[in-house]
Amino acid sequence: MRQHGLLHAALAGLMILAATLAGPAMAQGKRPLKLVALGDSLTAGYGLPAAAAFPTQLQQALKARGHDVEIVNAGVSGDTAAGGLERLDWSVGEGVDGVILELGANDMLRGLDPAATKATLDTIVRRLKARNIPVLLTGMLASRNLGPDYAARFDAIYPDIARAHGVMLYPFFLDGVAGQRNLNIADGIHPNPEGVRIIVERMLPTVETFIARLRPA
């Protein structure tokens, strides 16, 4: 009887130990992944209701595919890359698992030096990596009326940074939407809700690969 009691106590102790060790892991597994979409008006959802903005539509699409993800909209209309850098620390706070970085379009529209934009985006990526926050970099292409030299220098910014830092790249944020009148609001620059839906649809496989790396199965 005494041996039976000792065995029972030992088993109970092991069960308590296992529960103690598994508890944090289970809690972590249930916590939604937290992403921050750091960008300009294309992220903020300029001219759109909040429910139609890119971060919200992307979160809904991911949840529909079984991903427990929260995406914070840290888009500020009019922001250049430098503006994003200035607010980086408070836009991307603690407890963030990854960042979708969408900046640079306003730099291009203002004709800013691509070298300066590249240096700023590079700094953002380096600072996030220093905090162990993975980055999905979304690219932008220059308007061709800025000339071939400017376009070549600007277009190279995003693949160059992705290669230099080993971060994931979605080559063109507005793929399938840029220049399509029926997919943009009246200004012809910012996507309408259907345009955002297409952006999300096209980017979804890349984002799923990105979040799989944040929380491996």
Image: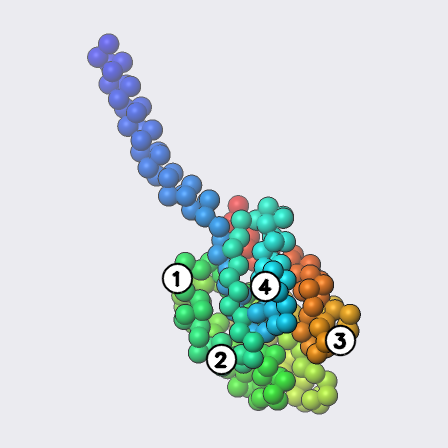
Vertical order, 184 against 201 (above or below): below
Circles 1 and 3 in contact, beta carbons < 8 Å: no
Name, please, the residue furthest toward the left: 2
* Residue that numbered label 3 is attached to: 179
Residue 199 lies, in percent from the top left, at 68, 64
Where residue 214 appears, as percent x and y from the top left, is 50, 55
Q: Quadrant of residue 158?
A: bottom right
Does 7 appear above or below 73?
above
User: Marks 1 and 2, how far apart in space?
Assistant: 20 Å
- The image quadrant of residue 51 is bottom right
Residue at image x 51%, y 68%? 74
Q: Nearer the viewer, residue 187 or 209?
A: 187
SS class, disc 2: helix
Q: CA distance from mark 4 to mark 3?
A: 23 Å
Direction from residue 98 to residue 12 in the image, left or right: left
Mark 2: amino acid? Gly
Q: Which mark is residue 50?
A: 4
Q: Say if mark 4 contacts mark 3, CB within 8 Å.
A: no
| Type of amino acid at the residue the image marks with label 3 | Gly
Spot occupied by residue 174 in the image (x, y as percentages of width and height): 68, 70
Residue 77 vs residue 145, the one in the foreground: 77
Q: Earlier in the sequence, mark 4 or mark 3?
A: 4
Horizontal placement of 5 versus 79: left or right? left
Name the one closer to the observer, 155 or 197. 197
Q: Circle 2 is placed at which residue position?
A: 83
